[in-house]
Image (cartoon, coloured by chain):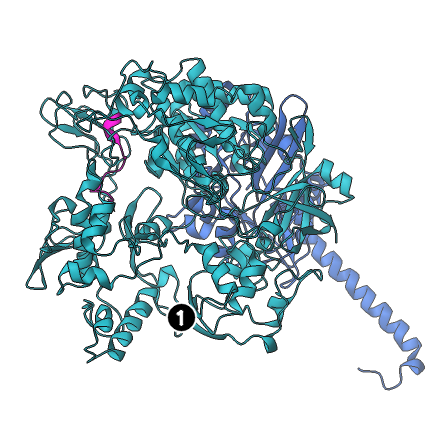
Amino acid sequence: MANLTNLYDVSKCTACRACQVACKNWNQLPAAIEPFKGNYQTHEDTNGDTYTIVRFIEHEDPVGGVTWNFLKYQCMHCSDPACMKVCPRGAYSKTEWGATIHDPDKCIGCQYCTYACPFGIPKYREREDKVAKCTLCADRVEEGMQPACAATCPTGALKFGDRYELLQYAEERVNFLRANGYPNATIYGKLELGGLNKIYILTDTPDKFGLPVDPKIPGQIPFWQDIVQPYFGWLIPLALAGSAVSFVTTRLLANKHKENKKGGHE
Amino acid sequence: MTNHWNDLKNTDCCLIIGSNAAENHPISFKWLTEAREKRGAKIIHVDPRFTRTSARSDIYAPIRPGTDIAFIGGMINYILENKLYHEEYVREYTNATFIVKDTYDFNDGLFSGYDPVQRKYDKNQWAYEMTEDGQYVKDMTMQHPRCVLQLLKKHFSRYDIKTVCKITGTPENKYLEVLKTYCTTGAPDKAGTIMYAMGTTQHTVGTQNVRSYAILQLLLGNMGKPGGGVNALRGESNVQGSTDWALLYHILPGYLASPQAKHKDLKTYLEMETPKTGYWKNKPKFMVSFLKSYWMQDDPEKSYHYLPKRENNKNYSHIAMFEAMYKNEIEGLFIWGSNPIVGGPNANKEQAALAKLKWMVAIDLWQTETSEFWTYKAADRPTDKDEYGTNLTPDKIQTEVFFLPACASFEKEGSVSNSGRWMQYRWKAADPVGESRADLEIVHDLMLRIKKLYQGSTKPQDEPITHLTWDYGPEGHPDIDKIAREINGFTVINGKPGKQIANFTKLADDGSTACSNWIYSGCYPDNEYLAKRRDNRDIAYPGTKPIGSYSNWAWCWPVNRRILYNRCSATPDGRPWDKERVSIFWDGSAWVGNDVPDFAKNKNPNEPGGKNAFIMRPEEVGCIFSACAEGPFPEHYEPWESPVKNLLNSQPFNPAIVEWEPKKRGTTDKYPIIGTTYRVSEHWQSGVMTRMQPWLAELVPDVFVEMSEELAKEKGIRNGDKVIIMTTRGDIKAVACVTKRFKPLNVAGKKIHHIGVLWHFGFNGYATGDPANRLTPHVGDANTTIPEYKAWLCNIRRA
């Protein structure tokens, strides 16, 4: 099955944030009302109840004057996701069409994924002691619908479809933008981390939108993935043995000081 | 809109001025981005602050609030000086060729005929020169010194680039870029559009701002063309509908003047109000049919007297009404889906005015700030300032308040008319919650019960009620279909509805037809309610390309015409100016094409009147010269409260406006900063609906005030600080948003600061804050009295 993805064209985005509301509506996420801090971007980052945000970034230079960049930010649905690599419980999986899915039933709230993700996407949701993130609306897509954000976008900045076709369209758009006042226009997500299942058409270089120019998976992750995880099976008896030893020793110690534990809860 | 939303995709250049379209009309950018993608169209944004619209525009030009006429006047001058106007169009389709009487004069900001006591003009001084047999005197070469084009040239010759930029604070290089880019649309095969909203109209010169756009568009030949027009973006899904249906005091449905004392009977009304030429000469048919729709059994001569008459020339607008209320002249008020103590100008005074009522009925989705104006939280203020006795606690308020819960748009059915005049039917999606009901049901029951109270009365003064035709069914849900049929109009036989008529051309002035709003006539011919049509095919006329008319989608007034004045989309002899974007053309025997002609279908371009494209005007041409309250041409006047003197004339402000509160005019010694108010995408109108929505409250949780880094530094304000904003009307508290997007303006060498405040906030809901309208003045436009929300003086300090 071909990869299905969202294309986001910043040159068409007016930052109305309908995507943000549509996301909360579909996923029934509660509002996280924080006081206004002096930027339209009320949440500094995504959070356990906010899977997607729109960034508002002001720049000024003496020649070009003021620019105001908008960027819809959410899970990039990496083709080889770090979150999936580090999750000790296998809570993450890839759908055959490219979405990275997190299963809350398997999640133990250890938050390794939140540190591993090069985009800082998975967020801890305290009220459930679990992690949460964008699902690319897998539940909608598998019923033949578009993700909620793409379906609601009024200007056509978000398009959902076949990744290969969208990439071709993105190449055309970038050529058009480069010829029409945006010489630094570029595609993001085509090559980054071996290709993201999310494509951005940017009017300027990725750093102007707060995107990592060359995102990398933290160095210790291959170690975890390649050395620790394959031996995970025999680590368990080892750990159990360790616990048994610890049990016996603590028991012995406890018995030694029995006089101190009179009327103990055992 | 003279055109419509979808048509924006046909433009070559879009000038957005007095509008933050991307934020407040997001869907417009669907079509503008398409125009840019497919046609390489350019988008220009002229606005005091850099907004989300500016971010998506090709050119952003800053402007000082309230100086649009100077800005556009400079464009007009540039076009005339460099002969960039579409000459054939101007000659054939506008009054540029008309000769004006020599009593017309202009000197130091005043036109001839000014009466400084009444603050009014004698408009007869600006009349056209007429021949003895009543024809307009014209000079087709447009060289006569008193022809409109030459008068226009003379009037705007003072608006050179240097002077304009000194007034508006626009950097000269940016202004030149705008001039060069937009004025290319004067080419015959090009089309430029203007999108405007409340940033244009909510000024003491609001009407003349729009007039300046009309002149610009007529000069460039942009009216009537696909991708052209002067397009008012309405701030609410049905503002167009409510205006068509006489939301304002001076009109009856269909833009018929509401009667005044001077119109002593129907005959006098029709004589005084009906022009001799142009399509409005049919007004008697519209008025008589309107009266018939109200009182079907009565003779219109008689039922005319059932209509209330206004006092001659008395102002009954929003400001005037609240001023009267404040003076104890009004006893009771129905406040219907409206929240004036957040949305009204000088909201402190309007709140105090409500406390002087004996009773008030509030009808809304839930309790609004206005329905709870009598509570303790309504009396809460950030400082001790109390200009209007607003700090009234419940024990001191005697007003009896009734609240009727209404249901939301998704919980009822009916039609709404969008900015493009499309009348679209909406079906109910969910049942109303609790006891809430549709507005229509509330009106219906109210009227039936009033009629019941008067049942059996034989008093003549009760006849307006006892004789009223109200046959939409018993109490409860009225028969919407029946109402729609009456809107369309039908023949009347023995005081009863007969056959549906095709459209307003079938209306009669003898009482044989009834029609509640002539411009909507044609929405329900025969047995199909056309507002319900949902055919989303864009079908092109053979041999042409589709232009986005979607003629079988819903219905549009008048007679399903999607672009007004579309006769001008063709050359005088009837060929399209641009073969790629054909609206209508003359095929040798009739006007055909992708739209309903705004012209007599079979009128040959070569017969007399065959080029008269503006059929609603008595002159039947587009008016570059047209009498408004403050003159036939727009002239730059400073806002009522301004930090600078006018560089073009010595008038302190618009000489034709009413000053309601002269003592409240703030001056620069205490209030040196320009203030303006506006909305954001995330909240809607006074915020009654959106502040109650957690997901929207989350996006913009507090009232904020935007300001430049320079001003913040001067005042010691940091981003995110709480600040107090002060005017002569009141103080409010807000959160500072210090941004690079605001810059001090260089106005004639003087550094002028400006700030902007959101006006969505009140004391109810998940997101609360002070209403910014506690700051705005009670002063309005000279023609419409629309309040000056956009340019006033204030000061700011850390809270």
Q: Position of residue B622 (x, y in %)?
A: 30, 29
- Indicate the colour of chain A: blue
Residue B623 percent coordinates (x, y): 32, 30
Q: Residue at x 15, y 46 (%)?
A: B503
Q: Which residue is nearer to you in this view: B710 or A6?
A: B710
Relative to A32, is B451 above or below? below
Does the segment drawn in magenta span residue B562? yes
The extreme bottom residue here reads: A263
Q: Colour of chain B?
A: cyan
In magenta segment, residue A136? no
Q: In the image shown, does B298 or A54 lie closer to the viewer?
A: B298
Placement of B88 over or under B721, stated as above or below: above
Residue B107 in the image: x percent, y percent?
Answer: 49, 27
- For image coordinates 33% across by 25% down, the residue present is B100
**Residue B739 visible, this orientation:** yes
Residue B524 to residue A98: above or below: below
- Residue at the (21%, 71%) spot, across then down: B463
How far from the left and from the top, in percent, is residue A129? 65, 61
Q: Is B207 displayed left or right of B519 in the figure?
A: right
Looking at the image, which is closer to me, A263 or B532?
Answer: B532
Q: Secondary structure at mark 1?
A: loop
Closest to the observer, B5 or B644: B644
The residue identified by callout 1 is: B433
- What chain does mark 1 sit on? B
- In the rendered image, the quadrant that contains the C terminus of chain B is bottom right
Classify 10 Å Cα crowding around label 1: few (below 14), some (14-19), many (20 and above): few
- Specify whether B145 is left or right of A9: left
Determine the image quadrant of residue B330.
bottom left
Magenta stretch bounds:
B554-568
Identity, as a three-letter code, of the amino acid under mark 1: Val
